[in-house]
Image (cartoon, rainbow, N blue to C red):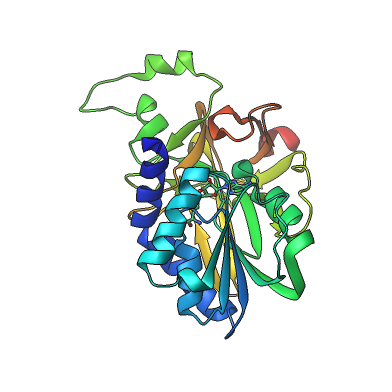
Amino acid sequence: MNPRTLLMHQIMLSDRTRLAAYDEALAATVRPGDVVADVGAGTLVLGLMALRHGAGHVYAIEGDPETAELATRIARDNDVADRVTVVQGDARVARLERKADVVVAELMGNLGPEEEMVEILAAFTRRNLAPGGRIVPERLRTMLAPVEFDGEGWGVWSQPVHGLRFSAVMDYVASAAQLHFFQRTPWVLGDPAVVADARLAERARPLGGEHHVEVRTGGTLHAVVGSFQAVLAPGVELANFPGYPGCNWACWVWPVRHIEVAAGDTLKMALRPPRDSARLAENWTMDVGLARESVRS
Ligand SMILES: C[S@@+](CC[C@H](N)C(=O)[O-])C[C@H]1O[C@@H](n2cnc3c(N)ncnc32)[C@H](O)[C@@H]1O
């Protein structure tokens, strides 16, 4: 098995906040005897949780053949082989022998949409969700927030580091995204813009055009942070910004030249997926512009 695949599952199983949120959402969603479809089942962790919460049967749909084999063994090791059917194949074309009362999936990318959860679940639920069926998560949003770093990441270039100046780097600002795990939460300079808001099972809609964010707190704009917020069930949310200990998702960071901004300034932002490699968050780009209160009046 590809060591990277195993490492990915290792990291995801170590993210306790992620697991606790899914467990809470499944406890609220699964009813006794439900048929549950675990889409992109991986190690089957979400399917096993669903069984604990009373599911009668779990269909585990997994595209990677070796991972599907592993899921079969894990079902056996947990003494639930008779209540789990592993279906190896692409969930977009899978057709189950029974309709699912609940569909659960965890296919969120750093920005939200890169792993195509909206597209995959739209195609899967069209064929396999029973009328009135439920989906975990129900909703996936992508947010953009203007930030000032607290002496780390892209923020170090205009601040003294050990009393030394490195601001020459600002002349080499590259239009390229970075993925970042925050050591300290950055200051958010304005209310984040919601640039995508999808109900799962709906068809994916293209990202909206330009979004405006009003600066609420003056400071130095270092970057725009892109992140996701998933509503797993009513009142149960999972988000990768500002992050939490053990969070397995990095935040997407779009560096900008460090500029002073004041309350009342407006930032104009447009997020752009790459044409051919939307699965790689590093390849997403954005445009950022600043409109000054003084310029407008
Ligand atoms: C992010 S992992 C989540 C694994 C597991 N559900 C969990 O929460 O730990 C996504 C899994 O979905 C599988 N996957 C991705 N796209 C798929 C597709 N279109 N059909 C079936 N499986 C898919 C991947 O191979 C991977 O094992």
Where in the figure is residue 164, as x and y percent of width and height? 24, 21
Name the outermost residue toward the left: 162
Q: Is residue 218 visible?
A: no
For the image shown, how many numbered marks are present on the structure?
A: 0
Residue closer to the observer: 63 or 102: 63
In the picture provided, is 159 more to the left or to the right than 272? left
**The N terminus - image quarter:** top left
Name the outermost residue toward the front: 82
Where in the figure is residue 132, as x and y percent of width and height? 76, 77
Q: Residue at x 63, y 28 (%)?
A: 277
Q: Is residue 77 visible?
A: yes
In the picture provided, is 186 more to the left or to the right than 136? left
Q: Residue at x 60, y 71 (%)?
A: 36
Q: Quadrant of residue 79?
A: bottom left
In the picture provided, is 229 more to the left or to the right than 14? right
Q: Examine the rendered structure and indicate whether residue 51 appears above or below residue 18.
A: below
Residue closer to the observer: 289 or 65: 65
In the picture provided, is 19 more to the left or to the right than 151? right
Q: Examine the rendered structure and indicate whether residue 176 appears above or below residue 13.
A: above
Q: Residue at x 73, y 50 (%)?
A: 93
**The C terminus - image quarter:** top right
Where in the figure is residue 125, as x and y percent of width and height? 73, 61
Residue closer to the observer: 168 or 240: 240
Where in the figure is residue 101, as x and y percent of width and height? 68, 74
Q: Residue at x 45, y 35 (%)?
A: 179
Residue closer to the observer: 172 or 87: 87
